[in-house]
């Protein structure tokens, strides 16, 4: 009898516990608090060659922060393939990190969810003021006219990396400045049995970065000024066609690049199979792939004609990582303190040196460490000829839809199918129709 | 069990009658209630794990759930049947893509289930006779089924690579079957790549089930048939296959549901955006939810998928069980 009673009690308790947990999840209300002032959870993006590289870079800095403030930072480096999904899940459940890194192009999309702490003047004052940050980096922190959803942490820009030896063998003394020169140089290299230019045809984000810049050069935008998608204008179609034609018509991009999505183009480059890549801050990756700094050169990414600058002379997106505070944080002051620490001049120098990126605060950027031949080009590009991706709530959707369209066009080119203005337009129209109705 | 307690109850009670009526009734309630109380945790877990998410998913399909409302999804605006209308409007881009994906999935499932069954059954039949090394071969056959999906499929993804993949190395470099190396992970060939992996992964299960089913066929039947002069093929057609009927009925249904719903294989093979030729419906729903960040539409598509599978399963069970009843009679 007693056994039965114990079992019955156990069953009743278990049921109650289950019912209680079932009710517990899902409520995502309320702002931040300072309930747990001694700890912080930090989701870092994968900036180094691997997750463990990031852990090695960040660990000593987090220890330093703990020594100074007594706040323990629990670090998790989240791979890029998971980061956006993880943030969305955290947004839905309200159970997220206190501080997190986001790709700066997602700023407006995530801003629209309302999950991130807005950086108004008062919050900026806590980390030393908005003026400390570089303008171009601030341009990619959220929709215009709203308080930024995040603060810039690392800045990056695209540049043309080239293999010095392969260029010398093909009899070329300097890297190309315009797209025509790039195609001509690429053909000379192809004649030597190597690939001209590398591309990541199945990497949606990379496709977007490339065609965005080309659209700028064709005087076109992917969104109308009031934020509606406009993917089928002549300029956009010409830009996408020009990018895919590097494989389809000019044949300076190898066909196998159509299925690349895991940075295979970089390992091809490091192995000397490809002579050029258009990439953002690739120096650290090349080193980890076993290529010496002296073996590659870097030059501004190409333009249609003339020299890089504003408007149609843009030759890079404003790439970079922003740091955001989750609104539901239980350590609001600690989170602000951690952002202040990570964006301090001292940490900006340490971290950006480790990652080969450019500091997003002015004082640190002026440091001579970022004036080496490898980084000077990136810094110059960011300052004069980089433009932020559209800061609209639909940005993430745009990356998936148009990125996939470009991927499919590369697949067509690789299969030997013709890539025409009509086929490009048809793909882009399909992408546009997939976008949410305004 | 209920029958025995009911019978025991009335008999037992009058014998020890002299107690007051009240405790007797609570005693009965206690006796009747105990099994239900013990079932309660399992029931609640079932609710929590299966039914609650399903109901929430169905509720979501009637909402306009976008990035603007995802943070507090309870208060997202109701949108009536808009999500469903968008999904089945086959003249619009969303509906057309869904229909295309649905048709691809149907063709893929029919081929994959058919091949899995054919290979699994053939292998099981060959393994029926005892010979040296049979145990080892059986174990080897089950390896694809035992491997974790991710590890197995990522290996296939490497093998299907254009430049360095094993498949192109064998087909092109060694056998010279193709004029130039083919792309398997993008473009039209991706369908065959996906089918290959799916069959490779699925047939050991068919093999396992059919092997188990074969154990139940009495050897006397074969002996009698052999005496009557039936050949191997006739034995298979007249004895083995009819005897396997109930097993096959369940096997085909399970394979169908697994294959139609498969998300892991295309996701690991192709990543977030599958090529059009291999755009299976699970991955398609996932991608369209995240392309538009409109999780309401994604839920509506999932509900439609659920309904379709329910209808197919229902019809299948109705047809096959009716057929069996008539043969039994």
Image (cartoon, rainbow, N blue to C red):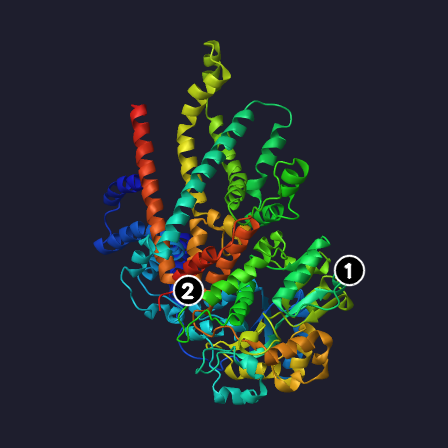
Q: Position of residue B260 (x, y in %)?
A: 43, 45
Which of the two residues, B245 or B190, is positioned nearer the viewer here?
B190
In this view, the mark in front (2 or 1):
1
Label 1: element kind: helix
Name the residue beneath numbered marker 2: B293
Question: What secondary structure is found at the residue carrying circle 2?
Answer: loop
Please name whichever residue, A133 or A346, is drawn nearer the observer in this view of the structure: A133
Q: Residue at x 40, y 42 (%)?
A: B106
* Chain letter of the residue beneath label 1 in the structure image: A
Quarter residue B146 falls in: top right
In this rendering, do the residues under marks 2 and 1 share a single chain? no
B167 relative position to A409: left or right? right
Q: Where is residue B241 in the image (x, y as percent from the top left)?
A: 43, 24
Whether residue A268 is visible, yes or no, is no
* Any part of residue A366 in sight: yes
Task: Indicate the chain on which mark 2 is placed.
Answer: B
Q: Are marks 2 and 1 in contact (CB under 8 Å)?
A: no
Could you say where residue A24 lies in the image, as x and y percent from the top left?
Answer: 40, 67
Residue designated by label 1: A169
Dividing the picture into quadrants, the one containing residue A436 is: bottom left
């Amino acid at each position: 009898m007693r056994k039965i009673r114990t079992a019955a009690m156990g069953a009743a308790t278990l049921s109650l516990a289950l019912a209680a947990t079932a009710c517990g999840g899902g409520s995502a209300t309320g702002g931040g608090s300072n309930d747990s002032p001694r700890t912080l959870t930090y989701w870092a993006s994968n900036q180094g060659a691997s997750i463990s590289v990031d852990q090695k870079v960040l660990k000593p800095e987090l220890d330093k922060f703990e020594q100074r403030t007594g706040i323990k930072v629990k670090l998790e480096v989240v791979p890029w393939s998971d980061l956006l999904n993880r943030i969305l899940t955290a947004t839905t459940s309200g159970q997220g990190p206190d501080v997190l890194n986001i790709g700066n192009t997602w700023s407006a999309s995530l801003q629209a969810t309302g999950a991130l702490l807005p950086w108004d003047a008062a919050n900026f004052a806590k980390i030393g003021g908005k003026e400390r940050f570089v303008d171009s980096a601030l341009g990619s922190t959220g929709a215009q006219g709203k308080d930024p959803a995040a603060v810039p942490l690392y800045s990056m820009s695209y540049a043309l990396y080239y293999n010095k030896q392969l260029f010398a063998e093909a009899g070329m003394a300097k890297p190309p400045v315009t797209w025509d020169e790039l195609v001509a140089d690429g053909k000379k290299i192809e004649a030597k049995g190597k690939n001209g230019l590398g591309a990541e045809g199945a990497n949606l984000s990379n496709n977007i970065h490339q065609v965005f810049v080309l659209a700028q050069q064709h005087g076109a935008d992917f969104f109308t000024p009031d934020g509606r998608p406009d993917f089928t204008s002549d300029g956009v179609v010409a830009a996408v066609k020009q990018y895919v034609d590097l494989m389809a018509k000019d044949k300076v991009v190898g066909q196998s690049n159509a299925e690349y999505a895991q940075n295979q183009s970089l390992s091809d480059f490091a192995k000397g199979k490809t002579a050029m890549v258009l990439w953002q801050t690739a120096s650290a990756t090349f080193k980890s792939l076993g290529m010496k700094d002296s073996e590659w050169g870097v030059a501004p990414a190409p333009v249609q004609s003339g020299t890089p600058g504003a408007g149609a002379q843009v030759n890079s997106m404003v790439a970079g990582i922003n740091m955001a505070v989750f609104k539901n944080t239980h350590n609001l002051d600690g989170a602000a303190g951690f952002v202040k620490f990570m964006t301090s001049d001292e940490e900006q120098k340490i971290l950006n040196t480790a990652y080969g990126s450019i500091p997003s605060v002015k004082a640190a950027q002026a440091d001579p460490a970022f004036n080496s031949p490898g980084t000077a080009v990136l810094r110059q590009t960011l300052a004069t000829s980089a433009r932020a991706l559209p800061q609209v709530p639909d940005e993430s959707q745009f990356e998936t839809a148009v990125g996939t369209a470009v991927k499919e066009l590369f697949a067509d080119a690789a299969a030997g199918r013709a890539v025409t203005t009509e086929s490009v337009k048809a793909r882009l129209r399909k992408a546009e129709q997939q976008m949410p109705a305004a | 069990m209920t029958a025995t307690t009911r019978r025991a109850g009335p008999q037992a009670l009058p014998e020890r009658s002299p107690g007051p009526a009240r405790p007797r009734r609570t005693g009965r309630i206690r006796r009747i209630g105990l099994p239900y109380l013990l079932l309660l945790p399992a029931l609640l877990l079932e609710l929590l794990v299966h039914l609650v998410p399903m109901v929430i998913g169905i509720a979501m399909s009637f909402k306009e759930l976008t990035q603007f409302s995802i943070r507090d999804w309870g208060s997202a605006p109701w949108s009536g049947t808009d999500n469903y209308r968008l999904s089945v409007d086959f003249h619009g881009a969303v509906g057309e893509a869904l229909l295309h994906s649905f048709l691809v999935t149907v063709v893929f499932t029919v081929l994959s289930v058919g091949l899995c069954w054919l290979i699994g059954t053939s292998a099981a039949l060959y393994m029926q006779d005892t010979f040296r090394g049979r145990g080892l071969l059986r174990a080897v056959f089950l390896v694809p089924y035992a491997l974790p999906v991710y590890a197995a499929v990522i290996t296939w993804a490497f093998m299907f690579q254009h430049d360095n993949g094993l498949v192109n190395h064998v087909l092109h470099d060694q056998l010279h079957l193709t004029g130039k190396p083919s792309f398997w992970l993008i473009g039209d060939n991706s369908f065959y790549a996906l089918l290959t992996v799916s069959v490779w992964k699925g047939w050991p299960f068919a093999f396992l089930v059919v092997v188990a089913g074969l154990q139940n066929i009495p050897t006397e039947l074969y002996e009698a048939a052999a005496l009557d002069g039936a050949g191997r093929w006739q034995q298979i057609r007249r004895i083995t296959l009819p005897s396997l009927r109930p097993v096959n009925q369940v096997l085909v249904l399970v394979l169908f549901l697994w294959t139609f719903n498969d998300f892991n294989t295309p996701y690991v093979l192709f990543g977030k955006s599958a090529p059009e030729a291999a755009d299976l419906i699970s991955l398609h729903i996932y991608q369209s939810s995240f392309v538009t960040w409109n999780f309401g539409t994604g839920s509506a598509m999932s509900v439609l998928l659920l309904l379709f599978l329910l209808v197919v399963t229902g019809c299948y069970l109705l047809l096959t069980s009716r057929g069996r009843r008539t043969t039994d009679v």
